[in-house]
Image: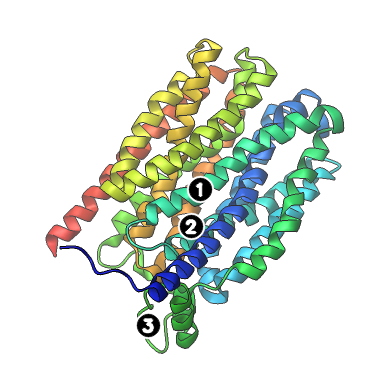
Amino acid sequence: MSRPPIPPALASESSDLARRRLIVIAVCWALVLLDGIDTFIYGAVLPEMIGGGHLGLTDATAGNIGSYTTFGMLVGTILSGTVTRWVGRRPAVFASVGLFTVATLGCGVSTGAGMFGFFRLLCGFGLGALLPIAIAYGMEFSTGRRKALATGIIMTAHQTGGAIAPLIALGLIDSAGWRSVFIASAVPAVVLLPIAIRLLPESPAILAARGRHEESEAAAAGYGLDPIARPPERPDRWESMKALFRDRQWSTTLLFWLTSFAGLMLVYGVGQWLPKIMGDLGYETGDSLLFSTVLNLGGIVGMLVAGRLADAVGPRRIVVLWFTLTAAFVYMLGTHLPVAVLYVVVFFAGLLLFSGQTMVYATVGTHHASSDRDTALGWVAGMGRFGAVFGPWLGGALLAAGHADYGFAAFAATGLFGAVMMALATLTIWLRRSAV
């Protein structure tokens, strides 16, 4: 039996609503692109800064500064969910982008390692705050069974930024110096931020959570979204935080956090130190930087592949499989392969590495209600930032001790740990549902 034709007026309205939702996701994508560039630009300039003795940086101090950045991300990420619920997503997004843009400019004019580290710390606050908010936007403004794919699409921007960052460094370091790389990385925000301010709406879920029900209903209708169920008239500001632990939810929450710890240790440990470790293992400088670009190109493909598969079979299964395969490919990075083969291995490592962590976010986002999603994502990303702090430090410590060859083996073990933690989280969810 064929379906009746859709009236032209309704088809036009549906198309217009889909276009509006797409604009929201596109704006989030563009802002996360800036986040990706400013995150990975540090790793791209490290070989030049350390090799040239700029600001007195050594392997050890560079690793410490990388950890300052990720500590800033930790704080920014944890605070983002709660602050967003209090002040709204729009102000939180614009504040985070403004902060990491100004801080990146500050890195370019720093006169010493202390000043440089301080600006990277500030940069981390903004970088860490933006990602969970942008992911929550993408999941809320997608419809049907496309939430994991929407998460993957938005995170392709982060990897696109990671692929662009080494190219900016290659294009500017020799001709204009390392400072110009940071300044050039901050310039696009001057154009994109005013556009985002005009186009990005407030979240219907956050409006409802803050008691602004009429505005929430109007915003949802304006984008073709389901209306948000009204919470109590006097909502508890800490309700979203409590939801992470009530009804034996605490065990799943903690295992999600440990999985995120492993994923972000991999992302920031491998992402920051790949060029330097490859250089220390004897590869040419040009190859070492291009390895980072290929790693992130693989990440872009991985986001799309993992997102589609996760929507079909569930993101938890993809996380377990992806982390296990990541361990194998990351271990292969340290086995002294021919350059041509190594490029292939780097591509697949990136395909698995970044999208595995992104599917952790998709798992958490689909596990919690929309009104609790910002808080749940903020905390899982924030707890994961402890891994992001530890990863760069570990890489720096191994390099400083002359053990570059141990780095990839340590990160491979981290991948296996993440797979086990998500498998255990899946078990706790199954046990809880069986007990109901």
Residue 245 falls left or right of residue 26: left
Q: In the figure, residue 93 lies in which quadrant? A: bottom right
> Residue 388: horizontal and vertical position, in percent?
53, 43
> Which residue position holds label 3?
231
Q: Quadrant of the C terminus?
A: bottom left
Between residues 38 and 222, which one lies in front from this camera angle? 222
Q: Are marks 2 and 1 in contact (CB under 8 Å)?
A: yes
> Residue 293: horizontal and vertical position, in percent?
60, 31
| Mark sitting earlier along the chain (2/3) | 2
* Residue depth check, mark 3 versus mark 1: number of the one nearer the observer: 1
Badge 2: residue crowd in 10 Å (few <14, some 14–19, many ≥20)? many
* Residue depth check, mark 2 versus mark 3: number of the one nearer the observer: 2
Badge 3: residue crowd in 10 Å (few <14, some 14–19, many ≥20)? some
> Which residue position holds label 2?
135
Between residues 23 and 259, which one lies in front from this camera angle? 23
Instruction: Give SS at disc 1.
Output: helix
> Which residue position holds label 1?
155
Q: Amino acid at mark 2?
A: Ile
Q: Which mark is residue 429?
A: none
